[in-house]
Amino acid sequence: MENMALYRKIEQTFFNSLSKKLLSVFMVFIPHALLTAYLLWQLDDPLLTRWIGAGLLLLAIAMFVWVAYLRHLIVHPLREITALLDQHSEGTGDLSQDVPVYTHDEIRQLATGHNRFQGKLRDMINRIRQLAIHTAVESARLVQMSRKVSSHAQAQRELTDSVRTLSTATATDVEAMSGETGAISRQTANNLQLARDSHGELLDITRHIHDMSQAMQRFSQTVSELSHQSSDIQLIAGLIKDVAEQTNLLALNAAIEAARAGEAGRGFAVVADEVRKLAERVGRATEDIFANIKHMVSQVDETLVETQGIVRTTEVTKQVVDRASGNFSTLVGDFELTTQRLTRMADTMQALATRNREITTHVAEVHGLSAEIMQAVSAAEKTTHDMNAAAENVQEVVGSFTTGDGVVEGLVARLGGFRQRVEQQLNGFAQQGLNLFDSQYQPVPGSAPPKFRLEYTEAFHRALQPLLDEIAQTIPQCVATCLVDLQGYAPTHQSRFAQPQTGNLTVDIAHCRHQRRFDDPIGLRSARNTKPFLLQTYSRDTGEVLSEISLPVKVNGRHWGALRMAISTDDMLAS
């Protein structure tokens, strides 16, 4: 162990490189050369000394040439491999360049093995990059879906709040209505009983009126017969009156004849006079009877007329009462149906109240579930954001390696060429005295979404919009491209997305994107990135899921902002 420690110390001190180790191989010839020189000096033979000295010099030269050759064959390839490995160990490096193969020995095998390993590493990095892109795209879509689900859950929660409020109010109303319906049902049942009692009394009245109508008809017949009999009595009274008048005339004639007869007819005259007096009394009595009978006949006639009117009225009343009785009977039947329906309605309202209470309970449960869904969606959205960030971190790590293939490296290279032209233009603006770091954002009145102007806005629009249009036309995968400063402000945009405002917010958000500040976390991260490039995947404010490559832009070495290019996720996944 002590010998090994001594060996390591000697190696670290004197032979800590391959060149020193190769040179040490030939150090064994130095004592031999010195001894030979000493012997030649002792022989004192100038010619031999010169030849041997020349041989030693040639040997020394050959030795150093051989060492240099071996150093080229061994040390140079190993240094190249070491330099590449140092780059890889620092997290950067060009994996597209293989180690050159110079020799046909173990170093060649080492270089070939390293190149095979580097090829596998390139493939692995490309696969990791593609998986990270796929993960970022899917996580961005999940974020978008989570936001929609969260929005729907929030709307559902608000609706359940409204439904719960309405359901509670409805339950109160239904309970009150159920109580009112029950009270109405009970009152209707009481009214039905009263109606039945009234119907029975009305039937009794109908029977009494019917009996009275029959009695009045009989009374009318009696009065009619009395009228006829009164007429007969009047005729008889008239006959008696006539007889009394004739008797009076006969008594007068008898008195006249008795007066003619003288004394002989005096007795007869007395009789005649008495007969006349009797006839006069009978006449007067007959006149009184006749007058009374006439008055009685008149009253009987009036009674007959009134009785007939009463009979007709009684008949009409009977018919009305009959109809009223029939209608009342129908009314009682309707009351019975109404009572039955009200009873069923009361039962239904009670069942409805019970179900409404159940609905209110279920709505409360749905409301609670909506809150849980929102919490779960919020947690899922955070997890998805974390997954997206992790995928972007993976992209950032693998992006530090150049593999020589893959759509991302191709796009970064092509966009880098345009970035150089942008920086040249910005440096020219700076030389002209334009303040490219102006931060006094002046709002554009009446703009929605809000727009701003800076000192350099118009100059950017005139000079750089054609370049942005060229990027969009030259790179097929480009969906949109713009320049932003460190605050996410885009003074101009490609023509397609720099249209005049229409007043329609949805249209303007999609097609009027110049002079706006994209200062959301995604936008600021792109604007302030200082690494060679940044790849992000996110849901745009227009609803699209896009990937984006952003390159930092500098003005005279000072970080100004970024050149952003959005790419279709389908193109990224297809790559």
Image (tube, rainbow, N blue to C red):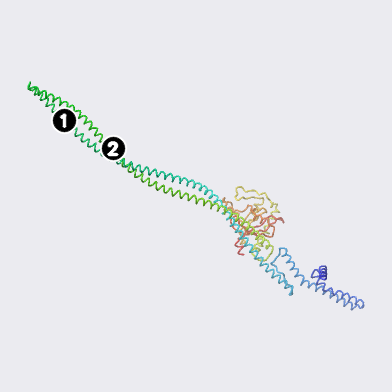
Judge left or right: residue 61 versus residue 516. right
Q: Residues within 10 Å of mark 1 (few under 14, many from 20)?
A: many
Element type at mark 1: helix
141, 345: nearer the viewer: 345
Residue 277: x and y in percent read 15, 24
Quadrant occupied by the C terminus: bottom right
Is the residue 203 above or below the residue 11 in the image?
A: above
* Amino acid on which disc 2 is placed: Ile
Provide the residue designation for mark 1: 240
Asked whether the beta carbons under mark 2 and mark 1 sit within 8 Å of each other, the answer is no
**Residue that sits furthest to the top in the current view:** 263
Residue type marked 1: Ile
Question: Residue 139: percent from the left, percent from the top?
Answer: 61, 59
Residue 324 image point, x, y percent: 34, 43
Mark 2–mark 1 Cα distance, whole angstroms, equals 36 Å
Above or below: residue 267 compared with residue 379: above
Q: Which mark is residue 528?
A: none
Mark 2 — residue? 310
Q: Quadrant of the N terminus?
A: bottom right
In the depicted view, which residue is nearer to us: 569 or 467?
Answer: 569
In which quadrant of the rendered view does residue 195 lie? top left
The answer to whether residue 472 is seen in the rendering is: no
N-terminal of the pair, mark 2 or mark 1, is 1
Residue 467 locus on image (x, y percent):
64, 58
Label 2's element? helix
Which residue is nearer to you in this view: 567 or 318?
318
